[in-house]
Amino acid sequence: MEDPEVPTEHLHEHIHEAAHESHDKWSMLVAISTAFMAAFAALSSLMAGHQSNEALITQMKASDQWAYYNAKGIKAEVNDAVTKINFSKAADSSKSVSARKAKLKEDQKKIQEKADELEKESAAHLGKDMILARAVTFFQIAISISAISILSKKKALWYISLILFAAGIFQFIVGLL
């Protein structure tokens, strides 16, 4: 899967230009905070992509386990069919067949447990992916509002961007846990 793209290059240019036009302290704070927002957006995007990939890989492993489970079931059924065809054989042979069938059923139970475990792990990775993707969204919106604040010279917008940045940080931390 592709990582979500964070298109912030043009915003950085505008912020940098605005910061150089008026070398005041507020412009520098906006520029620095926006750079941090962009760094966290990129990191969150990378982590979200990683979680998405892990979810897919784990789901493929679970699918492999289910295929293995089905193969064991088919093998048990074939075993039963062969037993019925060869019913006229000695009792020892049917005991051996019953033991093999019991072993196959036990194997299936273990395979099912592993497949269920892998499916839960895949779902956990997808959950983290969604949380990290939400963090990326908060960071992107914060970056945009920060850029608007410096271009329009409105500090209130910058404060809003900082609140959104904090929400993104929260989502980022939750996504890592």
Image (spheres, rainbow, N blue to C red):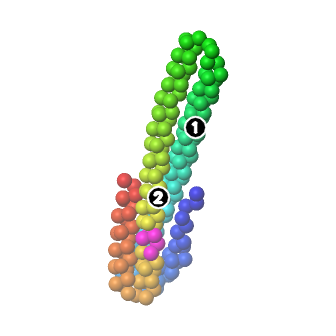
Residue 134: quadrant of the picture: bottom left
157 lies above or below 54 = below
User: Looking at this view, is 101 or 176 the one in front?
Assistant: 101
Disc 1 packing (10 Å; few <14; some 14–19; many ≥20): some
User: Looking at this view, is 93 or 172 the one in front?
Assistant: 93
User: Looking at this view, is 47 or 58 the one in front?
Assistant: 58
Amino acid type at image mark 1: Asn
The spot of residue 120 in percent (x, y) is 44, 47
Mark 2 to mark 1 CA distance (whole Å): 30 Å
Q: Secondary structure at mark 1?
A: helix
Point out the image quarter for the N terminus.
bottom right
176 lies above or below 13 = above
Magenta stretch: helix, strand or loop mostly = helix
Q: Earlier in the sequence, mark 2 or mark 1?
A: 1
Left or right placement of residue 31 versus residue 57 in this view: left
Disc 2 packing (10 Å; few <14; some 14–19; many ≥20): many
At horizontal 55% and vertical 11% (from top left) the residue drawn is 92
Q: Secondary structure at mark 2?
A: helix
2 lies above or below 19 = above
Which residues are the magenta region?
Answer: 137-141
User: Looking at this view, is 100 or 35 the one in front?
Assistant: 100
Tag 1 residue? 70
The spot of residue 62 in percent (x, y) is 53, 43
Q: Indicate yes or no whether the magenta region holds residue 160.
A: no
Number of marks present in the image shown:
2
The spot of residue 124 in percent (x, y) is 43, 52
